[in-house]
Amino acid sequence: MKQTRWRKAAFIYYNHMAAAGQLRAVPFAFNTLKFLAGECGSVDAYLWEPEQGVREFLPPNIHFYSRTLLNQSRWKPLLLRVYRFYHIGLKLRFLWKWQYDAVFAMGQIGSYIGEIVASVSRCPLVYLNDEFPQTTGHAARWIRLEKHAASKATLVVVPDESRVAPLLAQLQCARPLMTAVLPNSPLTKEAVPAIDWQTRLNLKAGVRAFLYAGSLHDWMQFPELLCSVRYWPENTVLIVQSARHDPGYRRQLAHLALKDRIVWNTEPLPEPELNSLTQFCDGSFALYRDVDDNMLFMGRASGKVMRSIAFGTPVITSNFPSLRFVSDNKLGYQITHPGEIPGCIAAMIEKRAQFRRDCVDYFEASCSFEQGWQGLIASLQTAINHGR
């Protein structure tokens, strides 16, 4: 039996808005909780969302305190909107949580709570960051509180090395912070289910499919992608896998529909099935607009890119320096204009077998979550030894 590193740890996941980033959809967070449970006798997980959607996929030594971070009074909606007194109530509620040997915290509100719990527990604080504090829509009060929490962190963890410098610049901490990189990668050890996607999605025989998976937004260049399909090689289709999207937004894009070339699947897919669909396709898309630093420094924070290469599917992504590893390692193509997409698709079809080998080999050597976790633990131990 593996010897546990800590008797009891806390995992706190609470974003700047409750609807931002469900735990199961963020491998950077979900896999951290899963692996943390393997290092501890028990873990208390404080989540904004109900545990019913995640409990069955995680070890039994995790105890959930779902929605306990929310104020349950009738004033909750107002408090959540203005953030005026919410932080004071949270501090009073968590000052007595002193029984932990380590605290892992993520999200703008989660990091604030994590600092409180780590302080009263006198234990290391691991601050997980996948979204820069100074993001459009974040309240100034919570930006200040997140910066304060980060300044007390034993270790700062980000999903891509390109994000370290801009994050530290935004945090403006008086003391140097130790950092580690943990990619936003899916776990690949479990078997991928064999699914006949051609039949399930009613695709024509021999069609070559390319995948867009996730929510629909302009900043993911979704309209440009739809426009490009008309110019793709014959016998190709775009599969849009999006269980969570605004019907009104889809209605606005109805004029870009292309019969038999754009296939919509709004059925929620469990992660194994999403992995299977990704593996089935000849390529995928992870396009972003440069709207802020979160996009510009996307890198291995992109769940779309990481899932695609993990399961041997090349990706077409944006021409940002942080995503240069895609083109440098022949994992797909970087583009600057949607007019380049048809040529990339033709090349992906022609070199499908080689792309599959290159993607899987690169992921196993450089992007696996397991390797990143070992690096995180080593960095945390170094930080503790240096009295952080």
Image (cartoon, rainbow, N blue to C red):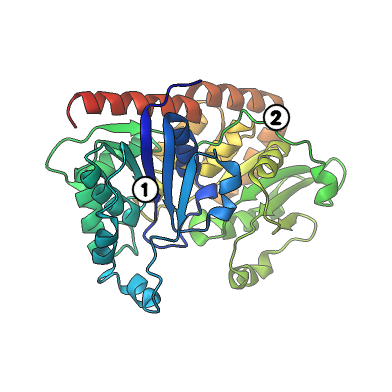
Nearer the observer, 225 or 173: 173
Amino acid under disc 2: Arg
Image x and y of residue 76, in percent: 38, 74
Disc 2 to disc 1, how far (Cα)? Answer: 38 Å
User: Is residue 169 visible from the viewing direction of this image?
Assistant: no
- Mark 2 lies on a secondary structure that is helix
Image x and y of residue 350, in percent: 72, 30
**Rendered position, 352 above or below 319:** above
User: In the image as oriented, which residue stretches furthest toward the right?
Assistant: 205
- Mark 1 lies on a secondary structure that is strand
Nearer the observer, 7 or 137: 7
Q: Quadrant of residue 383?
A: top left
Q: Residue at x 58, y 21 (%)?
A: 361
Image x and y of residue 189, in percent: 62, 28
Which numbered marker is on residue 352? 2
User: In the image as oriented, which residue stretches furthest toward the left?
Assistant: 174
Q: Residue at x 70, y 29 (%)?
A: 352
Left or right, 279 with reference to 336: right
Upstream in sequence: badge 2 or badge 1? 1
Amino acid under disc 1: Met
Label 2 vs label 1, nearer the camera: 1
Q: Which residue is mark 1?
A: 106
